[in-house]
């Protein structure tokens, strides 16, 4: 469903998802029911709905205002935000560049909970000036204040992408000097908390309330899986950052002598096993002399194949997209994606060709490092398609690492 833009500040569109209309209704209905049950002798049904609707409306409005101030602090700390979309009780930010300092991330993480607490303090202070909760406006102010207090504490829980999680991670980063230590510690905290929630949910499921037990068990299981996924993601980042091309098994080059005619070239083409292979590397007296595209056959009449030699049509090797065997894996992936063909030539320090590397070989290398060993039949099919196996989006991961300043 398409989101609706409500305003635009600092060039950033602020949008709300249509789900917010549903949330507004559900919150209004829930609060009005609560009012009817607790204060049915004071308020009639219409007044209960007014309290429910205005409480929900001002709560969601306070979330938007907090996000505006949070965005202001984020921009001052070097964050580049493309757009902000509000879902449920928070917002999802589409970020082009993250803050690269620990102190900056601490400031960004703390601002939203502080705003919730400040709003709650102000509203509860106002409501306490008039102890009579029978006045509708005072009732609404009090409820919005209590809900903001709840959101402030909720945001401080050190879990995942909540502000509390980012705050804990950034504090450890600041004192240890290592961003990775902060991420690892936070992930362990998430894992342990998720296990506790899962165990408590299972106990609640069989001994107390099935409904709440089921929800807690589901949340705990989701947290455990998320922690494991984060660990895998962290491992992939390390593989891309520290592994070199020389660690991969390269695809051998298809060779042809410079004085071979087109008929001999055609025979070699018919023997190829991989349909994606279309280049031959030309050798002369044992040395690499250039390369040709097998499609060159289509430019010459069959009658002239015996009189045309590949050496006359070769292109220099330095015009072939290439990387060095000492290059990092993430740089190689970027280079491959620039070619559009999905493979690239690997050279040694002396600029001598060593072999070909493609998406499938890189993907299989990463999976093997993670402990996934694919059967040879699957590997061969993936090599034929020349795609990253199992849908692993290595280019996207590299872009995220760049946005976070990890590369």
Image (spheres, helix red, strand yellow):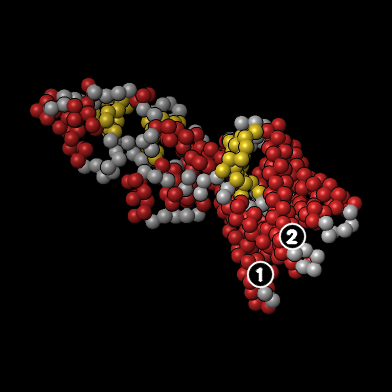
137 sits left or right of 128 in the view: left
Mark 2 or mark 1, whichever is nearer to me: 2
Near-viewer residue (300 or 263)? 300
Q: Quadrant of residue 195?
A: bottom right
Picture coordinates of residue 25, whole percent (x, y) = 63, 57
Q: Secondary structure at mark 1?
A: helix
- Please give the name of the residue rendered at 16% of the width and 26% of the height, measured from the top-left corner: 300
Q: Quadrant of the C terminus?
A: top right
- Please give the name of the residue rendered at 45% of the width and 28% of the height, measured from the top-left corner: 349
Picture coordinates of residue 357, whole percent (x, y) = 40, 38
Q: CA distance from mark 2 to mark 1?
A: 31 Å
Q: Is residue 221 visible?
A: yes
Q: How many marks?
A: 2
**Badge number at residue 69:** none
Q: Secondary structure at mark 2?
A: helix
Picture coordinates of residue 111, whole percent (x, y) = 75, 42
- The residue to which callout 2 is attached is 47
Q: Is residue 188 visible?
A: no
* Residue found farthest to the bottom: 207
- Please give the name of the residue rendered at 29% of the width and 30% of the height, measured from the top-left corner: 281
Q: Are marks 2 and 1 in contact (CB under 8 Å)?
A: no
Near-viewer residue (382 or 167)? 167
- The residue to which callout 1 is attached is 212
8 sits left or right of 256 in the view: right
Picture coordinates of residue 339, whole percent (x, y) = 39, 32
190 sits left or right of 126 in the view: left
**Mark 2 closeness class: few <14, some 14–19, many ≥20 residues within 10 Å:** some
Q: Is residue 222 above or below residue 306?
A: below
- Please give the name of the residue rendered at 78% of the width and 54% of the height, measured from the top-left corner: 140
Mark toward the start of the polypeptide (2 vs 1) = 2
Q: Is residue 308 above or below residue 166?
A: above
């Amino acid at each position: 469903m398409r989101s609706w833009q409500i305003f635009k500040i600092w060039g950033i569109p602020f949008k709300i998802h249509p789900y917010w209309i549903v949330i507004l209704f559900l919150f209004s209905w829930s609060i009005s029911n609560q009012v009817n049950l607790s204060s049915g002798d004071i308020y009639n049904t219409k007044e209960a709905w007014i309290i429910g609707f205005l409480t929900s409306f001002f709560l969601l409005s306070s979330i938007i205002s907090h996000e505006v101030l949070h965005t202001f602090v984020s921009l001052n700390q070097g964050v580049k935000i493309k757009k902000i979309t509000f879902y449920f009780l928070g917002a999802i930010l589409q970020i082009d560049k993250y803050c690269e300092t620990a102190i900056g991330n601490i400031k960004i993480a703390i601002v939203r909970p502080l705003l919730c607490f400040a709003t709650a303090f102000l509203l509860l202070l106002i409501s306490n000036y008039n102890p009579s909760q029978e006045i509708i406006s005072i009732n609404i102010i009090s409820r919005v204040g209590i809900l903001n207090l709840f959101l402030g504490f909720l945001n401080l829980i050190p879990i995942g992408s909540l502000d509390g999680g980012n705050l804990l991670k950034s504090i450890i980063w600041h004192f240890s000097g290592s961003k990775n230590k902060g991420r690892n510690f936070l992930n362990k905290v998430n894992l342990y908390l998720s296990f506790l929630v899962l165990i408590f949910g299972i106990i609640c499921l069989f001994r107390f309330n099935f409904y709440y037990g089921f929800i807690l068990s589901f949340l705990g299981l989701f947290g455990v899986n998320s922690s494991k996924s984060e660990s895998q993601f962290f491992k992939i980042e390390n593989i891309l950052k520290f592994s070199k091309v020389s660690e991969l098994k390269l695809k051998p080059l298809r060779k042809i002598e410079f004085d071979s005619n087109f008929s001999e070239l055609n025979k070699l083409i018919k023997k190829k096993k991989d349909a994606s292979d279309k280049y031959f590397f030309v050798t002369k007296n044992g040395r690499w002399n250039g390369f040709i595209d097998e499609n060159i056959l289509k430019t010459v009449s069959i009658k002239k194949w015996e009189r045309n030699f590949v050496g006359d049509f070769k292109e220099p090797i330095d015009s072939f997209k290439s990387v060095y065997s000492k290059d990092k894996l993430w740089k190689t992936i970027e280079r491959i994606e620039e070619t559009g063909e999905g493979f690239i030539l690997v050279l040694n320090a002396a600029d001598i060709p060593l072999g070909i590397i493609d998406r499938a070989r890189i993907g299989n290398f990463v999976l093997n490092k993670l402990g996934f060993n694919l059967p040879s039949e699957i590997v061969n099919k993936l090599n034929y398609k020349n795609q990253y196996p199992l849908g692993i989006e290595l280019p996207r991961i590299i872009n995220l690492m760049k946005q976070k300043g990890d590369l």
